Amino acid sequence: MDAAPHLLDRHPREWPRACEELGGRAFHGKSAAQWIFRRGAGSWDEMSDLPAGLRERLKAEHPFPRARLAARSAAADGAVKVLLALPDDATVEAVSMPGTRGLTICISTQVGCPVRCTFCASGLEGLARNLTSGEIIEQALWLRREAGPFGRVVVMGMGDAGHNLDATLAALDALLDEEGMGLAARRVTLSTVGPKGALERIAAWGKQVTLALSVHAPDDALRHELVPGVRKRALADTLAEADALFSATGREYTVEYVLLEGVNDTPAQARALGRLLRGRRCHVNLIPWNPVAGMAFHCPPRARQELFAQTLRDAGASVTLRRSLGRETDAACGQLRRRSLPIAPPPQAV
């Protein structure tokens, strides 16, 4: 008989029943969820209103925290990154970043990544495994303890949420619903390359989170080189599914585009991207490449970044040119984890 799932892998509304199964009362489960999701408790021992016997059962059958802090780095700009080691010794990253409206956290959905973007450290070793919903949630809990309360969540760390959608949506349910953390859906962004069927499932889920669609090129040929995991997908089809998601939720989506010098950053490519997005309800996030040791890409000079952004605007697109945070703390996806792994030969720039 399979063991019961860890409490963090169950929606907080199920915690009252789970505590009854452990010999407690239903209200103990509600209290435990409040301690974890609202009050920031770091262990069952802190929950002074739970019976000692129930706390012991919880520690024995549902250890919390499951992850340990393997590394922590902080940048002068306020970015804080943590590397968490899971019980099977897999490691995963999460980062907290300052903003004009408080802290934003960026959390991961997989150990490694199957998409293997050639400019990203996350996928250099491929995919090790998916994270459970509780392992995704625990990143948010760790960051709150390490960096402070946050107001925004970006599911844009290691891995691709679209390739681990069941666990990702279950984790977001716990963070969004009143029984859990009670965050506003409009303050959550979910990033994916848009594998087949993923955007339709997000639309059916129905919560008004913001989709961040990883594009990175204005045409299929270049996108398939930069993002090998989408070689069976046409960009036009993916954008049509994103348009349908907008129709279902009323939430404009963002197009994520990492700028790589001499690869995808020419004015002609900006004009091509503008034509591709004309008439769509989306906003473009231009992201200057965050350097990864051993990779043959370069970040475009600021003037070249601004020219690309202005060319897109002239084509009618809504555009934000982002600034990079945490470069001295390896804040780009996968870099802190990569320090602890044998380094595989990196993919070459196209």
Image: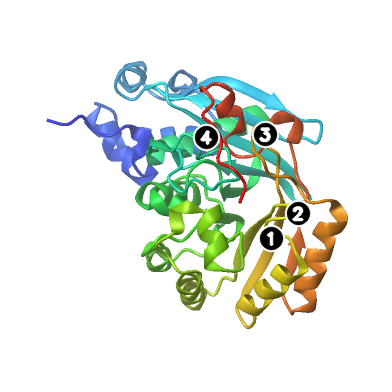
Q: Is residue 95 visible?
A: yes
Work out how far the residue at label 3 is from the one at label 4, CA to CA, in angstroms: 13 Å
Q: Is residue 211 visible?
A: no
Q: Is disc 4 surrounded by few (<14), some (14 to 19) or many (20+) residues within 10 Å?
A: many
* Residue contact at pointers 1 and 4, CB within 8 angstroms: no
**Residue indicated by mark 2:** 322
Residue displayed at 64% across by 27% down: 146
Q: Earlier in the sequence, mark 2 or mark 1?
A: 1
Q: Is disc 3 surrounded by few (<14), some (14 to 19) or many (20+) residues within 10 Å?
A: few
Q: Where is 248 relative to 85, above or below?
A: below
Residue type indicated by callout 1: Asn
* Residue contact at pointers 2 and 1, CB within 8 angstroms: yes
Q: Is disc 2 surrounded by few (<14), some (14 to 19) or many (20+) residues within 10 Å?
A: few
Between circles 4 and 2, the one closer to the viewer is: 2
**Residue indicated by mark 3:** 148
Work out how far the residue at label 3 is from the one at label 2, CA to CA, in angstroms: 23 Å
**Residue indicated by mark 1:** 285
* SS type, badge 3: loop
